Amino acid sequence: MFFTSKEDTAFFWKTLIMARTDDTTFGYAYPSGGWLAKVRNALSQFSDIFSEFDKYVAPAYHHDRCERSVQMRLYTMHKREFVMVFVAFFACFGLGIFVGVAGPPITKTTVVDKSLLLPKTNSSNGYKRDIASGPFTMRTPTMTTYSQQLWVIAKLSTENTDGEIIDKQFQVSVSISGLTEDHKPVAILDSKNNNRTRHLKCEKQACDEIIVLHLGFLDYTHYIITVHFYGLEAFHQRYNIKDLKFYVSSCLNNYKLRK
C-alpha cells in the first residue's frame, strides 16, 4: 500500500488506532450476580464435598451390595437330625432336673436338744428353771468351704391345754465365739451388746419358731454360741415349757475360705 501524501498516511494510522480502540472497548461480558451468587456457589461446593463422605458417615443398605461377593449357603436339616436335636435338648434338661432333685440340699440343718445344752444339776427344780432362761451353750457343726450363712432357730412346746392364742414378748441375748485351728476361742460378739426382743406365739401346745441368730458372713470352721432367755419365767410357771430344741442351719453357697 502506497500513500501519496502525508495526509493519507496520518488518516490511515488514525483509522487503525480507532479500530483497535473499538475492538477493546466493545465486546461480550458475563453478567455478575453479586454476593448472593457467591453464597450459592459456596454452599454448592460444600454440598459436593459432604456427599463424598456421606457414604462413610451414614452408609445406606445398598452400599455394601458390591462387597457381598460370597454367597450365603443355606443348610437344611433332615427329619432325623431335627428329632435328634430335640431329643438331646430334652435329655440335657431332664438331667439338670435330676441333679437338682437328687443332689445335695441347699441347707444343712442339725437339731440340738435342750438336754445336751443345760448344765447338769442334781435338782429337778433347777433343771425346770433353767429351761426358761438358760444359758444354752452349743457348738456348731463344721462349716465347710461352701457354707455361706448360719441360722440358729429355737422351737418350744408347752403343756397348755387352753384354746387361747398366746403372744409373749421376751428378750434374747446371744454371745458368739469363733474357734481357730488351734481350738482357741476368739470373741466375736458379747451378750451384753446383743440383746434383742422376740415374740413367742403359741396355740395350744405348739409354738412358732424363733430366729435366735443369723450370721451372713462366716470366718471360722466352728462357732460356740451361748443363748440366754429373759422374761419367760412367768410363762414357764403357767404353761410349763416341756420341750426346747435348737436348729442350727447353714446355707451352701459360694466358695469361701475359712480360718
Image (cartoon, rainbow, N blue to C red):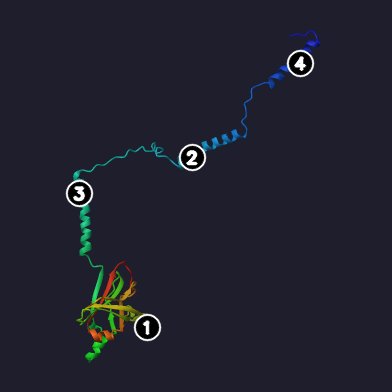
Residue in the picture at 30% in, 73% down: 150
Q: What element carries label 1?
A: helix
Labels 2, 1: front one:
1
Question: Crowdedness of circle 3 by 10 Å Cα count: few (<14), some, many (20+)?
Answer: few
What separation in Å lies between label 2 and label 3 (alpha carbons)?
51 Å
Q: Residue tagged by mark 2?
A: 53
Label 3 vs 4, first from the N-terminus: 4
Decide: is 55 above or below 97.
above
* Dot 1 crowding, Cα within 10 Å, few <14, some 14–19, many 20+: few
Residue picked out by circle 1: 192
Viewer-side residue, 123 vs 51: 123
Q: Which residue is drawn at 24% across and 75% down?
A: 110
The mark closer to the camera, 1 or 4, is 1
Q: The residue tagged with tag 2: helix, strand or loop?
A: helix
The residue that disc 4 covers is 14
Could you say where residue 57 lies in the image, as x and y percent from the top left? 46, 42
Q: Do the residues labelled 2 and 1 touch (CB within 8 Å)?
A: no
Give neighbour class at mark 2: few <14, some 14-19, many 20+ (Cα, 10 Å). Answer: few
Question: In whole angstroms, how far apart are the C-alphas of marks 1 and 4?
Answer: 132 Å
Badge 3 amino acid: Met
Q: Amino acid type of disc 1?
A: Lys
In the picture, measured across the screen, residue 56 lies left or right of residue 178, that is right
Place of residue 235 in the rendered image (x, y in percent of width and height, measured from the top left) = 26, 84
Give the secondary structure at mark 3.
helix
